[in-house]
Amino acid sequence: MLTRLGPPAAILLLSGPILAGLAGTMLPAFGYLPALGGEAFSLDPLRQLAAVPGIAGSALLSLQAGLASAALSLGVVMLFVAAWAGTSAFSRVQHLISPLLSVPHAAAAFGFAFLIAPSGLVARFLSPELTGWERPPDLLIVNDPMGFSLIAGLVAKEIPFLLLVTLAALPQVPLARTRQLAASLGYGRIAGFLYCLWPLIYRQIRLPVFAVIAFASSVVDVAVILGPSTPPTLAVRLVGWMNDPELSMRFLASAGALLQLGVSAAAILAWLVVERIGAGMLRVFCEEGRRFSRDAALRWLSFALMLASALSVFAGLGALAIWSVAGLWQFPDALPRSVSLKTWIATAPRVVEPLATTLAAGLISTVLALVLALLCLMREDETGRRGRRAAALIYLPLIVPQAAFLFGLHLLFLLGGVGASLWALVFVHLVFVLPYVFLSLSDPWRAFDRRYEAIAAGLGRSRAETLWRVRLPMLARPVLTACAVGFAVSVGLYLPTVLIGAGRLTTITTEAVALASGGNRRVIGVYAFLQMLLPLAGFAVATLVPALLFRRFRAMRV
Amino acid sequence: MDHQGLRLDGVTIALGPRALIAISHTVAPGEVLTIMGPSGSGKSTLLAYVGGFLDKAFTASGRVLAGELDLTALPPQERHVGILFQDPLLFPHMSVAGNLLFAIPQAVQGRAARESLAESALAGVDLAGLGARDPDTLSGGQKARVALARVLVSAPRALLLDEPFSKLDADLRHQMRELVFAKARASGLPVILVTHDEADAAAAGGTIVRIGA
């Protein structure tokens, strides 16, 4: 009976806040917000927005970040999979990269900044021997005005995501046979894969690619850390206006959020053109029978890029860890002269409260998301129908730019007298956690051999008993992994937390990003390290608990 | 347990416009009704209908009675019809004994009583003393016998066999056939067997119904 409630509840949760939030953004953008004196519709907020200096530049930066990071990360993943899928090197790199998915964006961005900054780890290792620098050079590498470091940071973080969704689609194509066939016709590995298999795979990863574009074109935390500051990207400026104590700025912020929606939509529309061109080129090459049989250089390039992206994140995380315990660390010393826990000890008292909030919001929203996802999947079993249209809804919170609906939602919360409470925070986190928990759990859930349930029923066991004693224990590993994914998503959420928490509820992530402008690398190191540690702990639990519970049972091992 | 026969009363199953099965038949205690047909003929849907887990895509009508009890009016878990598939499907997260304890009816109370029942059920299929084992460490034949012991110990009203011998190699297949039919006869269980193997049907020795020819 309860399962009946699952799908409607999930649909309501996924679409309700987004639709209400969009409305809450739209109305003030056109001047209507009686609570703040906007009694009539007008175009004033939009005119005001158009008059903001550098607004077009900010919008273009966002557009460029969205398109460029999606194109680059998809390009690397596509070439790498085309060149290497099915080899042992492929599975090794895959295992290296998968854990990076759980690293929060802000932590990865900080790590990347610590790596590439003029006084960063790379410069320190090369100096002074190779560069001759005795002091950090006066270069604007991080926060460069063109947004290159922002794009690079986003690419390094989106590659693991796109690789993972591609891996999920890969088993559905006949890889080995197609490779043999294409090779026997004289095609190079990359060309053969792209002609025969990529179109099938791309069809399946299209929504995740859109999600990457929408995310990258509207991201706040990464843009604060790595993006340009004169002017910053659109989303960063929006948050500034939203947090302005002058309440009339809300009209401008809403107009800006509307522009953000337009920018992300424009980026996706532009991508549709890119898709057409790419598909057309592929078809022409294919029909001309171009073999591209000597593709070794490109194969190794794709390998190198993939490895470099992974290593840059790992090295960045290493840099964070070192900075958090660094004593005196002068340029160009490669490593600190001394190591101490001073920063950790000094920071600890301030960390407790944000840490508690992070854990509470993460754990509660994950458990709620798990229950909802399970109810939906169980309902699917009962009806025997996969709600295809409902499935597209899952991607809604990932494709609508966060800024566009969170502003409106925040405003509605304020007007409705819902203050910055833990429950409001959990509610907003749930909107983002549920899709990931559902997506991560649905494949293993559907792959379960339902004859086990038939057997249990034949043995006289009720559906509830069968669920608790057979299906859930047998699926313990994927269920816990889905929880770890959900928890990691919650820990990494920046904009929803900043807006709904309204400065009164802070998490490790919001605290870390708030430190970005201050530039105290040791303290940033502590926060960003914690930020990366929390999801990791989640995945460790998800691995160790089933391993311990079922250590006696061979078939329960991976 | 004192078994009564299993009566299929005007059972029809269809997939859309295509009629798959139409059968009325009574299986006496200890007897085997064999349904034969090529793969894709829908012969397994009859077992799913009797067991109560027929896919929603099929339309079915007719009653299945155990004695006077209308099973079709009951949810699957209250029908108490045991089923054996071609895979043993032992629960991989429970020990061999755990699998049996899961199957023993709740009416058998007390840990010691349940454990001794499990142990004697294992002995009944020549697997005495293997209760503590991880099912994944057993041989294919041993697994099949545990699956048989598991379904018998649940005190079912009837036994459904869904090509249960097809994945065993020739020697084992012969042994398992003998064992399963002997056990069913000894417990007076009405059995419905679905197979495409003539030798299964011959060994079962009961009525044979051919469908989808």
Image (cartoon, rainbow, N blue to C red):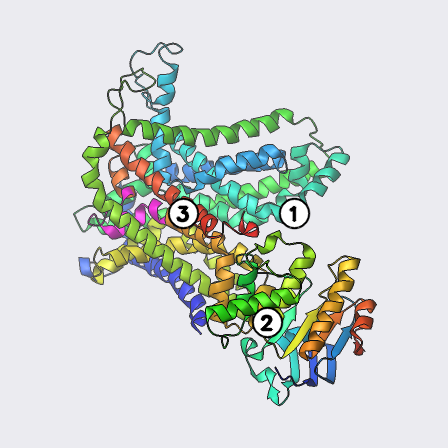
Q: Is residue A177 left or right of residue A7?
A: right
Frontmost residue, A67 versus A84: A84
Please determine if labels 1 and 3 lie on a single subunit.
yes
Residue receiving disc 1: A173
* Dot placed on the residue nearer the N-terminal end, 1 or 3: 1
Marks 3, 2: nearer the viewer: 2
Query: Residue at horizontal 57%, vertical 84%?
Result: B73
Tag of residue B153 = 2
A30 inside magenta stretch? no
In the foreground, A344 or B83: B83
Residue A227 shows in the view? no
Residue A133 visible from this viewpoint: yes
Q: Is residue A5 above or below residue A418?
A: below
Residue with the mark numbered 3: A541
- Residue type of the residue flagged with mark 2: Val
**The N terminus of chain A lies in which quarter of the figure?**
bottom left
Of A118 and A550, the residue lying toward us:
A550
Q: Name the secondary structure under disc 3.
A: helix
* Prevailing SS of the magenta stretch: helix
Tell me the subunit letter for badge 3.
A
Please give the count of numbered marks on the rendered protein: 3
User: Which region of the structure is painted magenta?
Assistant: A489-508
x and y percentages locating residue A33 in the rendered image: 23, 59
Disc 2 is placed on an element classified as: helix
Label 2 lies in what chain?
Answer: B
Q: Of the residues tagged 1 and 3, which is closer to the observer?
A: 3
Q: Is residue A138 left or right of residue B196?
A: left
